[in-house]
Amino acid sequence: MTTGQEILVLGGSGVDTIVRVDELTVPAGDSVAVPAIRDYVAHTGTGVALGFHVLGRSTAFLDLIGEDEQGELVRARYRAAGLDFAWLPAPAGTPRSVNLVDRQGRRFSFYDGRHPEDVRLPADFCRPRLARAAHVHVSGLGICRDLLGEIQRSPATLSTDVHAWDGHAAWAENYAYGSDLVFMSAATVGDRAPDVLRRILTRGRARVAVATDGANGCWTATRERPEAVHRPAVAPPGPVVDSNGAGDAFVTAFVDVWLRGGDVEAAVLAGSASGAFACTRAGTHERLITRAELDEAVAALR
């Protein structure tokens, strides 16, 4: 690891409005009473940046957010946490999503993806922080697309999360084929996950590719072993109440172990423990696992 800024996270802040429901279906009639609806500072960049920060890593986060009420929620959350955050105004405002969460903690998200297609995080804004980074995590968003080449030419390692990519859509290819560590959800690809991971490794520069699959565990593939291996999930340390943020928690702990020289098996164990912990907490990124808690959870699983 280089000295100075260890981790740089680019893009992916926003606000979740979480609605707790009995089932992920629309009931009969035109309304239904639900528990109190709450807004949370959320989205993937928030989870990764705060996750690294809480684990004790020096972390910087750069993004575009709105000069609106939601943007102030975001800035206030990071100020309270002590996270190093710099931002530029987003012309369409702060990204939002409405997430339904059922009694089993499963969620379905309506994400507004409001950044216009041509809006980008400027390279001049990011370059000073990039020069100090040992590792960069890029959210798979259009605003970061033009930064990949510059990151690839730097000494920093690069990770990304292409979320529920279908393995074909062109928007994710630069991220999937241009990063050292590639994370995705198996929610869309399902049984095709091993084939998609193999293609990521054979067509791109990835050293490791991972498809998380919730309670079903995850698939991992490496450059040395591109045939995907299935790894089971771990039992959460308490009742599952909300799966929002579990994937980001997995990514953060996995990358943390990988940066410390751990192998894929150790990284998956840490990621799984971190993701399971997140599922036992309501809201998105409200309570992240600490270094001591992660070490204790991993030790109990060995």
Image (cartoon, rainbow, N blue to C red):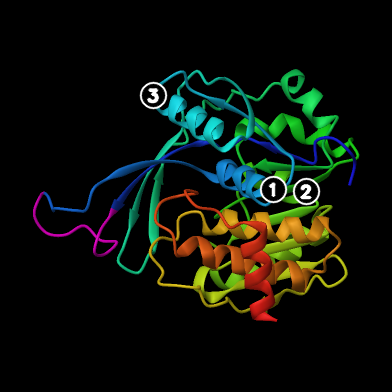
Q: Amino acid at mark 1?
A: Thr
Q: Nearer the viewer, residue 279 or 99?
A: 279
Residue bearing mark 3? 69
Q: CA distance from mark 2 to mark 3?
A: 34 Å
Element class at badge 3: helix
Residue bearing mark 2? 179
Q: CA distance from mark 1 to mark 2?
A: 6 Å
Q: Which residues are magenta?
A: 20-30
Q: Residue furthest left?
A: 29
The residue under the point 88% across, 69% down is 224
Tell me which corner region of the image, top left, top right, bottom left or bottom right, holds residue 300: bottom right
Q: Earlier in the sequence, mark 1 or mark 2?
A: 1
Tell me which corner region of the image, top left, top right, bottom left or bottom right, holds residue 259: bottom right
The residue under the point 46% across, 26% down is 71
Q: Left or right: where does residue 271 sit relative to residue 259?
A: left
Element class at badge 1: strand
Mark number, residue 160:
1
Instruction: Report x, y in % for residue 172.
Output: 65, 46
> Can see residue 11?
yes
Q: Residue furthest bottom?
A: 302
